[in-house]
Structures are given as structure tokens and as C-alpha cells.
Image (cartoon, grey):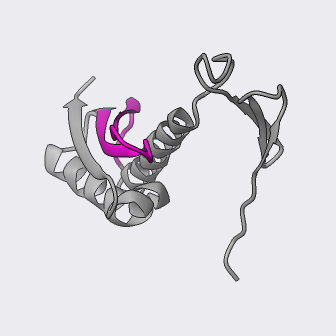
């Protein structure tokens, strides 16, 4: 049976601020003035954070399974929004930064491709709708 996930968003200020609950955790979303009070994440910021951590988790799993050392790993996401409604992302650029003393660029590129194509559900969900561009920096620190 497929795993079920759920989340609930409740309007809390009569404007655009929502309290979101999922998995026993809470997060707040809001919009910028004049629509909101800028007192929480924009929903699209949460999406970028989710995509970054999803890609990072997949890469961490691949690297660990392959016996690669992870000194530091970060994934930065920057989305460019469409100019017309819906104002979703037209493209997203990911920058993967890995410090590892025993990982090659070819290995990292292979792991990134597998994460984008198969193992990161968020990347898989957007791959036919949003241009996804991933670059990486590998250092030996």
C-alpha cells in the first residue's frame, strides 16, 4: 500500500497568513504587503527548500552507500517565476556544493542525474513543467 502524507493550512489572521501543520510540525506562510504581512515563508520558498533538501537527501544517500566521505553538502535553489498567471516557476537553478576527499566529478554528476530523474520526488514532479538546471562545485576540503 502506498504511503499517505497529509498537511493542513489554517488561515490565522484574516489576510494571507496560514499556520501549516504536517507530521506534528508547524510552519507559517504569508505573503508580502499589501496582500500579507511578510510574517512567514512564501509558499514557493517552501517549495524551493523542499526541493533543495530532497536533492540533498538523495545525494547524501548515494554518496554514503558508495562509501564516499561527505565533509559538507549543501544545495541552493533559485527559482525564476513566470510573468503571467499562474506565477509558478518557469525555471529553477540548483547549485550543489560538496566537499569530499574521495568523490570524483563524474561520480557526483551520475548521482545528481539519478536524484533528478528518479530519487527526488519533487524533481520528478516538476521535470515536465519547469526547466531544472543543476550545477555543482566539488572541493577536496
x, y (%) of residue 102? 25, 40
User: Magenta region's main secondary structure?
Assistant: strand
Name the image quarter holding residue 85: top left
Q: Is residue 14 left or right of residue 115?
A: right
Name the image quarter holding residue 141: top left
Residue 76 colored in magenta in the image = yes
x, y (%) of residue 111? 29, 55
Q: Is residue 5 left or right of residue 90?
A: right
* Towards the viewer: 16 or 5: 16
Total numbered labels placed on residues in the image: 0
In the rendered image, is residue 99 in sight?
no
x, y (%) of residue 70? 39, 36
Residue 128 colored in magenta in the image = no
Q: Residue at x 73, y 33 (%)?
A: 27
Q: Which residues are magenta?
A: 68-97
In the rendered image, is residue 126 in sight?
yes
Q: Residue at x 33, y 37 (%)?
A: 83
* Towards the viewer: 46 or 52: 46
Q: Residue at x 15, y 51 (%)?
A: 106
Quarter of the image with the N terminus is: bottom right
Furthest residue toward left = 106
Q: Is residue 118 left or right of residue 43?
A: left
Q: Residue at x 22, y 28 (%)?
A: 139
x, y (%) of residue 98? 31, 33
Amino acid at each position: 500500500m502506498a504511503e499517505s502524507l497529509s498537511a493542513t493550512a489554517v488561515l490565522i489572521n484574516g489576510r494571507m497568513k496560514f499556520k501549516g501543520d504536517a507530521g506534528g510540525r508547524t510552519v507559517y506562510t504569508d505573503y508580502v504587503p499589501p496582500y500579507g504581512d511578510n510574517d512567514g515563508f512564501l509558499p514557493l520558498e517552501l517549495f524551493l527548500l523542499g526541493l533543495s533538501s530532497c536533492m540533498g537527501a538523495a545525494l547524501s544517500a548515494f554518496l554514503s552507500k558508495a562509501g564516499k566521505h561527505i565533509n559538507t553538502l549543501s544545495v541552493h535553489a533559485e527559482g525564476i517565476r513566470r510573468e503571467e498567471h499562474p506565477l509558478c516557476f518557469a525555471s529553477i537553478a540548483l547549485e550543489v556544493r560538496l566537499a569530499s576527499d574521495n568523490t570524483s566529478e563524474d561520480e557526483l554528476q551520475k548521482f545528481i542525474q539519478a536524484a533528478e530523474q528518479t530519487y527526488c520526488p519533487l524533481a520528478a514532479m516538476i521535470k515536465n513543467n519547469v526547466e531544472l538546471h543543476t550545477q555543482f562545485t566539488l572541493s577536496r576540503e
